[in-house]
Amino acid sequence: MSMRLMNCISKKIKVMIVTQHAILAEGIKKILQSSKETTVIGSSTEVAEALSIIKDCKTDVMLIDLDMFKQGHMKLLNYLKANQISVKVLLLVDQFEEQAI
């Protein structure tokens, strides 16, 4: 059984990280993996890859870098909404600009 599939059937909180910053994703992943309650089911720098992971594995929480939206990547949220996928979404921001949110 693949590691990805094992993570999908875990009873832990399943987290997906979507950011264009690999170092940020790795840091968050290490922090979350140190918890007994969470497992990172995937990390992606591209929306298409994130969509593929979501289709394969139920995700409880998605951490999405707000910079992804600045690049016109609203596809991800539109897909979640259109397909009525129940997932908590947390937006990661590097600076607070009310207009950006």
Image (cartoon, rainbow, N blue to C red):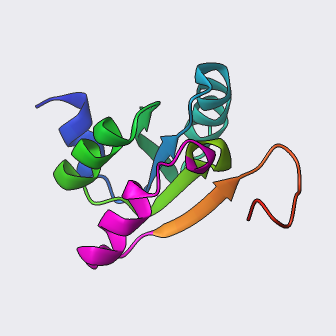
Q: Start and end of the magenta stretch?
A: 69-87
Whether 66 is among the magenta residues is no
Whether 82 is among the magenta residues is yes
Looking at the image, residue 80 sits to the left or right of residue 100; the answer is: left
Residue at horizontal 34 percent and vertical 60 percent from the top: 11
Q: Nearer the viewer, residue 76 or 60?
A: 76
Q: Nearer the viewer, residue 67 or 50?
A: 67
Looking at the image, residue 70 sits to the left or right of residue 58; the answer is: right
Looking at the image, residue 18 sits to the left or right of residue 6; the answer is: right
Residue 38 locus on image (x, y percent): 51, 51
Classify 99 as above or below 32.
Answer: below
Q: Quadrant of the N terminus?
A: top left
Residue 8 visible (yes or no): yes
Residue at horizontal 44 percent and vertical 34 percent from the top: 43
Residue furthest top in the image: 23
Res 33 quadrant in image: top right
Residue at horizontal 38 percent and vertical 56 percent from the top: 75
Q: Nearer the viewer, residue 37 or 80?
A: 80
